[in-house]
Amino acid sequence: MSIIFDVSGLTEFATRLFFAAGLEADKADAVGRYLVEADLMGHSTHGLALAPWYLQGIRDSVMTTRGSYELISDRGAVQCWDGRRLPGAWLTSEALETAVDRAREFGTATVAIGNSHHIGALAAYLSIATDQSMLASVASSSPSGAQVAPFGGLDGVFTPNPVAWGIPTDDQPILVDISASITTVNMASRLKRENRVYDHSWLMDRHGQPGNDPGLLDNGATLLPTGGIDHGQKGYGMALSVEALTQGLAGYGRANKPKGTNAAVTISVYDPAAFGGVDKFIEQTSWLRDACLANRPKDSSHPVRLPGQAALQRKAIAVRDGVELYPGISEGLQAEAKYYGIPFISAKA
Amino acid sequence: MSIIFDVSGLTEFATRLFFAAGLEADKADAVGRYLVEADLMGHSTHGLALAPWYLQGIRDSVMTTRGSYELISDRGAVQCWDGRRLPGAWLTSEALETAVDRAREFGTATVAIGNSHHIGALAAYLSIATDQSMLASVASSSPSGAQVAPFGGLDGVFTPNPVAWGIPTDDQPILVDISASITTVNMASRLKRENRVYDHSWLMDRHGQPGNDPGLLDNGATLLPTGGIDHGQKGYGMALSVEALTQGLAGYGRANKPKGTNAAVTISVYDPAAFGGVDKFIEQTSWLRDACLANRPKDSSHPVRLPGQAALQRKAIAVRDGVELYPGISEGLQAEAKYYGIPFISAKA
């Protein structure tokens, strides 16, 4: 039986839960809001499914609950922060707001954050910039994880190292969110919990053989880089560039061998008004959207879509009709609510 | 029989050839230098193989031979240029130098160029930034070309849309150069000329079937996006982000339906000194290099390599021993030398 929750009620519940667990109000707000945002967009491995893990991180003192980041540098169009293991949702949304302000002044701005806690779904933050007609990227890596091998190698060095792009158009933005590996750790964990395997061989066992069983990851398997066995030098290149952009610029990463949940995040914002102009930018991106949507589909029952299009449709429906959480998430939240002694949200009537 | 050329002699010859064809001295210098640089690095489809096509572009007045770009905007960390169809090698190297200067001041800088002529091999320019211990990216797209379809579609909308990254370490830089399609137009043209086919099915015919025959491109086939039939949404996302970053920011692109050889280029430079510090950046990237090189190889006769490593080795050997051009290139250059009445370079003794 599916349970439908009201979006604002669910957000309020999630915020109360993190506040009860010890996060300061602004941090609890950010974590509640952006985890629910990920669920609304259908990124269900990166939404409230993460809440029990985050709460455990608070109980284990891996996630910092109070205070602000340490400002390492400020050079006009650039800032570098030590995130002090504060919640990634709070750091990332603050960094995007800072970068939007600075991009309005200098044309572009980049904020690099080291030592953040986990940041969830990258695509969830992009509207902070696209709502201001700005182009934005968010890149992330986790120096304490190593599930992706360099192309030609067998042992994990990288995390999936995603990069998301928010591209304004004259209507909804295009929201790209791609990782340097074909699949993610969270997806592999979900399939494993559900005794399922991948439809394709997106993993490589410790001897270099492709495989589709997420259980292989317990025996030294890795997630294949984007491009796979065939042209995985592409994903390898992406992974290296994200490492340099995130941990490199932040000045804190694998070389420091951090333990526990840890992320480096780099946000760049570009103000089209400072380049060829907003109108001309929007003209190009809207033309492109139209060319993609009008493209002759390979399968006539599946018209070509834009990245983010399905997510934004799901969100609009969820805001109107309520959101149905992926199986198991509701039970996890209920247990946490009981632990912290706050009422669990009731289902939508 | 292979012919070996002295590197400085070959560069001088190429420069003289472009000067004789009408390029101003600084433009002829840049085109000669960066085409030869691509050959030295082994990017032989993007080196002097392009010279006859560039020279035809000069004769057809598609490449502008004199003057400078038009400065559309200058906002501190940002500039936008109308490249006036000047040679891409000149525009791109000038833009990288400008971005390095601005990044030193503001921490990061981005130069977007619309309406450039072709720029050759992206990786050839990166040392302008990495020699200054700066992280750099070069992205490019060609709004008059359309050989890559959106994922799920059948008709070309994008060019291969490459992005290159120059990552300084405590020794040689890591030079990433990846495109949003598995293969490139120039590679397909070469295989076709040589009556060869791809080892893998990296093309898709006009009905959506994978294929390996470059001749298919004459019948509406497209280059598959990175990730291929299996996970080509990754390449699709990359292509869209490059379109926004290049043509979008430049404010000139597909929506303007430009004819002839035309490129948009966007260069971003990040000064690690303005973030967490150069030493800390180099510590991370050097650690990463070591971790990749020490990785247990899938094939024990092929140790894991870094992007750019083989190219820099080839370059060092070519500088010392001379460079051997890919078959056919020398003949093309000889014909052009005859046309412009300049002596062809003699082979190295």
Image (cartoon, coloured by chain):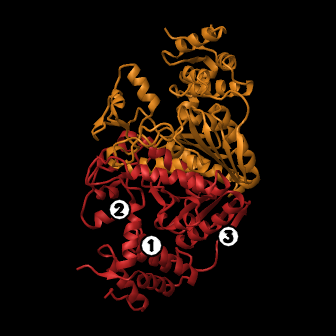
Chain colours: A orange, B red
Location of residue B110 with respect to B50 vertically, above or below: above
Q: Is residue B45 visible?
A: no
Which residue: 36% across, 29% down?
A218
Q: Where is residue B120 drawn, in percent x and y?
A: 47, 67
Corner quadrant of residue A148: top left
Kind of residue at badge 1: Glu
Question: Which sits earlier in the primary sequence, circle 2 or circle 1?
Answer: 1
Distance (Cα) linking label 2 and label 1:
18 Å
As drawn, is B127 to the left or to the right of A338?
left
Residue assigned mark 3: B70
Residue assigned mark 2: B187
Q: Are marks 2 and 1 on the same chain?
A: yes
Question: Which sits earlier in the primary sequence, circle 1 or circle 3?
Answer: 1
Residue assigned mark 1: B37
Name the one closer to the observer, A29 or A11: A29
Question: Which sits earlier in the primary sequence, circle 3 or circle 2?
Answer: 3
Kind of residue at badge 2: Met
Marks 1 & 3, CB-CB < 8 Å contact? no
Kind of residue at badge 3: Glu
Q: Where is residue A206 drawn, in percent x and y?
A: 31, 38
Which residue: 38% across, 45% down?
A227
Q: Where is residue A176 drawn, in percent x and y?
A: 54, 41
What secondary structure is marked by label 2? helix
Location of residue B52 with respect to B233 vertically, above or below: below
> Label 3 marks which chain's residue?
B
Which residue: 42% across, 47% down?
A235
